[in-house]
Image (cartoon, rainbow, N blue to C red):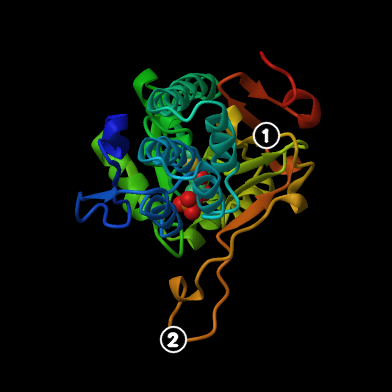
């Protein structure tokens, strides 16, 4: 498993990022020497995943402070880099009171610790021999260490209850086929990459026991935005009477956003889908709360009605 510092760290004069666009073929780092460069790295998905971009933005503010740059300008350019994951705005808000490297590092380590706690809560939900289907990458790469949904898979595997993971390749940028599969391979967890469109027939064949994903923003009513295709899986899971668990830190819960329709959905370059024909490229979709069996945060297992359970500090 990668150490948090291998995914993102602050060095003298630079935020250093593992370039996730090149994985798994090449393990290369990118040095960003100011907040504008970090914002571009977030936008172009050198680093991606909701908690990881929040952590990266925190380090970028610390870098800007050390350079003597205007912190409002740094905040603005970072905040505009990707709109859906609320962790980005959360981390920037946190850094306003204390833009020090120590504070950014604490935000980073706290996110990793939240992952470890929510992973244990999620593993509690799984029976022996569970076969999980997951989408996109919600691993250590996406959180700055350990992972949310993939962290839960690690914890379940360590307990001996996880039998197999079906990994959606996750069109169009293949975070599943490139990143989740790479992380599961490193952990020796049995897995197979599938085309996104294979999920329905696997469920119909009785080869899936539950779906576990991360989230980029969870609204106050429990509607959850995640990588495009998650909503399709939720509909399929309901049809096949399988639970869908959303695993995300409390920093992904946005009580100021009332419901899914209020979540801003990023639209990316259509060329990521096809450069040959006209294309549409929404990067996220919203899974309605009624299709989510549980939302697991470091606080515990939140069940419907989510408007109440998400607003509660600790749940059973
Ligand atoms: O576009 P991405 O790769 O940043 O999208 C990432 C996801 O959708 C993840 O599932 C989500 O951020 C949770 S990461 C712990």
The quadrant of the picture occupied by the N terminus is: top left
First of labels 1, 2 by sequence position? 2
Task: Judge by depth and name the residue closer to the eye, 11 or 236.
Answer: 11
Q: Position of residue 10 (x, y in %)?
A: 31, 35
Q: Mark 2 = which residue? A: 276
Q: Mark 1 = which residue? A: 293
User: Could you tell me if residue 207 is visible in this image?
Assistant: no
Q: Residue at x 75, y 42 (%)?
A: 257
Q: Position of residue 77 (x, y in %)?
A: 51, 53
User: Could you tell me if residue 128 is visible in this image?
Assistant: yes
User: Of discs 1 and 2, which sits in the foreground?
Assistant: 2
Indicate left or right for 202 with 243 as reference: left
Q: Residue at x 48, y 35 (%)?
A: 149
Is label 1's Cβ within 8 Å of ligand 1? no
Vertical placement of 271 versus 314: above or below?
A: below
Is label 2's Cβ within 8 Å of ligand 1? no
Vertical placement of 90 versus 264: above or below?
A: above
Label 2 packing within 10 angstroms: few (<14), some (14-19), many (20+): few
Q: Position of residue 189 (x, y in %)?
A: 31, 35
Residue 24, labelled with which disc? Answer: none
At mark 1, the secondary structure is: loop
Q: Residue at x 42, y 26 (%)?
A: 112
Q: Position of residue 26 (x, y in %)?
A: 19, 54
Marks 1 and 2 sit apart, C-alpha to C-alpha, by 40 Å
The quadrant of the picture occupied by the C terminus is: top right
Marker count (numbered)? 2
Q: Residue at x 68, y 46 (%)?
A: 238
Q: Quadrant of residue 283?
A: bottom right
Q: Are marks 1 and 2 in contact (CB under 8 Å)?
A: no
Q: Quadrant of residue 108?
A: top left
Vertical placement of 15 versus 232: above or below?
A: above
| Residue lying at the far bottom of the rendered structure | 277
């Amino acid at each position: 498993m990668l150490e948090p510092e291998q995914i993102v760290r602050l060095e003298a004069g630079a935020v250093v990022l593992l370039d996730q666009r090149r994985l798994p073929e090449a393990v290369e780092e990118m040095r960003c020497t100011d907040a504008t460069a970090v914002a571009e790295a977030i936008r172009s998905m050198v680093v991606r995943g909701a908690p990881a971009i929040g952590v990266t933005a925190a380090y970028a503010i610390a870098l800007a402070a050390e350079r003597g740059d205007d912190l409002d300008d740094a905040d603005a350019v970072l905040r505009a880099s990707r709109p859906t994951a609320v962790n980005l705005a959360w981390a920037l808000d946190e850094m306003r009171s204390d833009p020090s490297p120590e504070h950014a590092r604490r935000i980073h380590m706290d996110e990793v610790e939240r992952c470890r706690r929510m992973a244990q809560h999620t593993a509690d939900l799984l029976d022996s021999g569970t076969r999980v289907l997951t989408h996109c990458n919600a691993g250590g790469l996406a959180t700055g260490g350990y992972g949310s949904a993939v962290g839960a898979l690690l914890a379940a595997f360590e307990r001996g209850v996880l039998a197999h993971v079906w990994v959606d390749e996750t069109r169009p940028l293949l975070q599943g086929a490139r990143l989740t599969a790479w992380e599961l391979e490193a952990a020796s967890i049995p897995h197979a990459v599938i085309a996104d469109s294979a999920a329905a027939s696997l469920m119909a064949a009785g080869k899936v026991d539950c779906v576990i994903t991360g989230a980029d923003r969870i609204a106050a009513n429990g509607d959850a935005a995640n990588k495009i295709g998650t909503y399709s899986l939720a509909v399929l899971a309901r049809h096949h009477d399988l639970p869908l668990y959303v695993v995300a830190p409390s920093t992904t819960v946005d009580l100021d956003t009332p419901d899914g329709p209020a979540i801003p959905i990023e639209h990316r370059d259509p060329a990521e889908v096809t450069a040959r024909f006209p294309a549409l490229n929404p990067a996220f979709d919203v899974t309605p709360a009624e299709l989510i069996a549980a939302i697991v945060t470091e606080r515990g297992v939140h069940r419907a009605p989510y408007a109440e359970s998400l607003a509660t500090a600790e749940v059973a």
